Amino acid sequence: MKSAITSLLFVFFVFVSLGAAAEPVKETRTVNRDLAIQNLLIGLDSDNAGLTSSSAFYLGELSSTEAVIPLMKMLRNAEQEELRISAALALLKISDARGIYAIKRAIIFDESKRVNDMCEKFYNAYLYDKYSSEN
């Protein structure tokens, strides 16, 4: 009798645990995209080059159209080549016409050959994606 009760309890707990495991797992944290974009825009104005560069990168990953104007400003005015290249890459990922035009102009007017070359590669990649998807 004692072993039968133990067996029934064991089976009961197995079914209860299987039922709990079958329920969908709810997301405990939701990401607020707008808040993230606002924080990244603040990061663009930082004096820390690493923070500025990574903020530009993630704004590009999020395809934030709100960031186009600040990124264009960064592409034109940043002192470090790396920051201008990060801004160009972010603008390429966003694929807004204003940003693509800024990349195109940086090919001609940026004083750094390195930035010119990278912007030319980014612009060529944009054209390749644009016209290869049409065909």
Image (tube, helix red, strand yellow):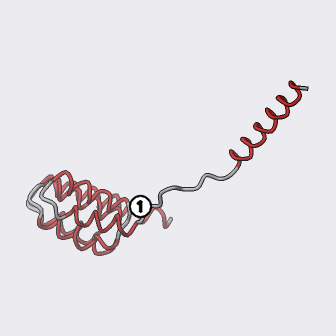
- Quadrant of res 120: bottom left
Residue 28 image position (x, y, % from top left): 51, 55
Judged left or right of residue 77, residue 10 is: right
Outermost residue toward the front?
A: 2
Query: Image quadrant for the N terminus?
Result: top right
In front here: 27 or 88? 27
Numbered-mark total: 1
Picture quadrant of residue 66: bottom left
Q: Residue at x 24, y 61 (%)?
A: 88
Residue 65, quarter of the rendered image: bottom left
Residue at 14% x, 54% y: name it. Answer: 48
The residue sitting at 29% across, 61% down in the picture is 90
Residue 105 vs 114, above or below: the answer is below
Name above or below for residue 21 compared with residue 46. above
Q: Residue at x 82, y 29 (%)?
A: 6
- Which residue in the structure is indicated by mark 1? 129
SS under mark 1: helix
Q: List x then y, in percent, for residue 113.
A: 12, 54
- Of residues 69 and 111, which is closer to you in this image? 69
Structural crowding at the residue carrying mark 1, measured as other residues with C-alpha within 10 Å and reported as few (<14), some (14–19) or many (≥20): few
Residue 99, image x, y percentages: 28, 70
Query: For the residue marked with disc 1, what is the amino acid?
Result: Asp
Residue 69: x and y in percent read 24, 74
79 and 12: which one is in front?
12
